[in-house]
Structures are given as C-alpha cells and as structure tokens.
Amino acid sequence: MIGSAVRALLMALLVVIPSLVLPGTSSDAAQMAALVALVAAVVTFAEYASEYPTFLEFRNAPPFNRLRFLALFFCVLFASLILASGQQDPALPPTVLQSLARDAASLLDFPYSPVRLMSIAYADVPVWFDTQTAIDIASLLLFVTLIALLLFWIHARFIFWPIRKTAFNFWINLPLFDPTSGRDVLFRLKRDAHFNLALGFLLPFLIPALLRMWIGAFDASMLALPEILIWVLCAWAFLPLTLMMRGIALFRVAALIEEKRRRAYAQQDELQIV
C-alpha cells in the first residue's frame, strides 16, 4: 500500500512539473495540471494497490516501468528547466542543461534525422517562437530516451530479465494478452514484438509529419505555448521508447517460452528413449 501511494505521488509530481518550474503559469493551466495529476495519481494507486492487474504491462517485472517513468520524468523536467532558463535575461551565461542540449543538437540534428524533421515541423510556427530552443530540447530528450532504451536492452540481454529474482507471471505482467486465443502464443509474441519495434522506430519520423498537418489545419500558435511544447516533445521522444521497450520485452518473453518448450521436448525425448 505504501509503495502504491509513493508511485501515485510521483505520477502526480510528474504531471505538475511544468506548472511548478515555468514562470508565469496561468491559473487555468495550473488548475488543469492539478486535475490531470489527481487523475494520474488515482489511476496509478488503483493499479498498484489492486491484487489483480488491469491494463499496466510488466507490473511485476522491474525495471521496465521504472525506466519508463524515469525517462519521462527527466524528459519533462529537463524540457521545463530549459524553457524556464530561456525566459531569463539573455545576457546570462547558458546553464548546464542548455549546454548539454546544444551539444545533443549538434550530434543529432543532421539531414533526415528525427530532430531535423521536428525542426521543419515547427518552421511554420509564428516568428516569435524560438525554434532553436525546441530543437535543443528535442535533441536532449531523444538522447535521454536512447540512454533508457540502451539500459533496458542491456538489462534484458545480460542480466536475465525478467526471471533474475522471481518467476515470470504471464497473466499479471501481460494482462491484455490472451495466450489462449488465436494462433500459437510464440508466433503472436514475436509478431507483436516486431510490430512494436517497427512502429517505435518510425514514430519519431511520423510525429513531425502529423504536426505539420496540425499546423496547416489549426492554430499553429497553440504548439508554441510552453506547456504544450513540453508535452508534445516529450510524447515525441517517449512514445517510441515505450514501443521499442515493449518490443524488446516481448522478444525476451518469447525466448523464455521457447527455451522452456525446448527443455520440455528434450525431456520427452529422453523418456521415450528410456
């Protein structure tokens, strides 16, 4: 119960970070953030306090959800701090985060990269919008998510996730996956893993195109609002991370099932020989 409450508080804190960090946040934006934070906290508490799973995958297979939360937390925090620093006196020297963001932009902003496509998507936003700041933030967030993805891959590949400490409960960790319906569970796991990895790879390229469509059809100035900019860039970086982590996790679960089947078949062959 205490762990569920702590997780709920952390989720609420994650949602209200932009309102706490950005100067000049309006009362309406603060109230909306508080409402969303309350909903996120209630849903998180109900999910982890319940004995039976609802929709959250890999609930009992750390550090899957912990890495996802930390990646999103740092993305929101870093984006908020950089935007808050950008609203200060331009004569002040850049902060450490601003310098890191510029270094990440120099590394990741190359032709046809997701960062370059995001900068093109924001090219039609009003002139007063600082496009370079958005590029720097996008580069830093992409770098953070790449680190999180690498850490999870290392953990899954070399540290025997998810069976290092406890057995893997298929129903609790994959509540929305019905192993009894459709084709063979191994085939479906690998198919879903391929789909998640492919979609996760394509999303950083597809989201800028969707933003261009939004800018062409609706008010482009909305995307320049600091709170909306933070969540758009965080979604652009975080959704691909989630999909690719899920793909890696499903491949790992499929490998465990395949290994268990191989052992079972080997035992049957030994019994038949005897």
Image (tube, helix red, strand yellow):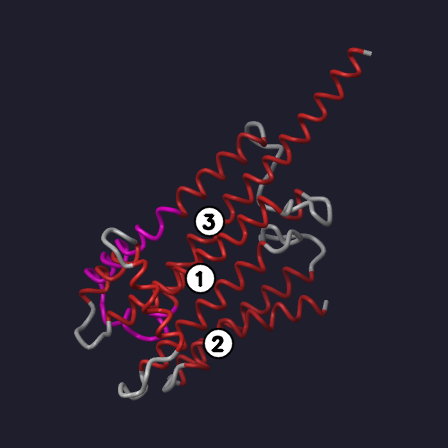
Q: Residues within 10 Å of mark 2 (few under 14, many from 20)?
A: many
Name the residue: 63% across, 66% down: 45
In which quarter of the view is residue 5 placed?
Answer: bottom right
Q: Which residue is mark 3?
A: 243
Q: What is the three-letter code of the residue carrying label 1?
A: Val
**Measured from the top left, where is residue 196 in percent x and y?**
45, 43
Magenta residues (range): 201-230
Is there a contact, CB below 8 Å, between mark 3 and mark 1? no
Element under label 2? Answer: helix
Q: Residues within 10 Å of mark 1 (few under 14, many from 20)?
A: many
Q: Describe residue 9's horizontal placement relative to residue 74 as left or right.
A: right
Q: Describe residue 173's horizontal placement relative to residue 149 as left or right.
A: right
47 up-or-down from 171: above or below? below
**Measured from the top left, where is residue 219 in percent x and y?**
22, 68
For discs 3 and 2, the disc positioned in front in the rendered view? 3
Q: Which residue is mark 2?
A: 16
**Measured from the top left, where is residue 272 in percent x and y?**
78, 12
Name the residue: 69% across, 62% down: 49
In which quarter of the view is residue 102 placed?
Answer: bottom left
Q: Which residue is mark 1?
A: 144
123 up-or-down from 21: above or below? above
Along the viewing direction, whichever of 63 and 181 lies nearer the viewer: 63
Q: What is the three-letter code of the residue carrying label 2?
A: Val
211 up-or-down from 224: above or below? above
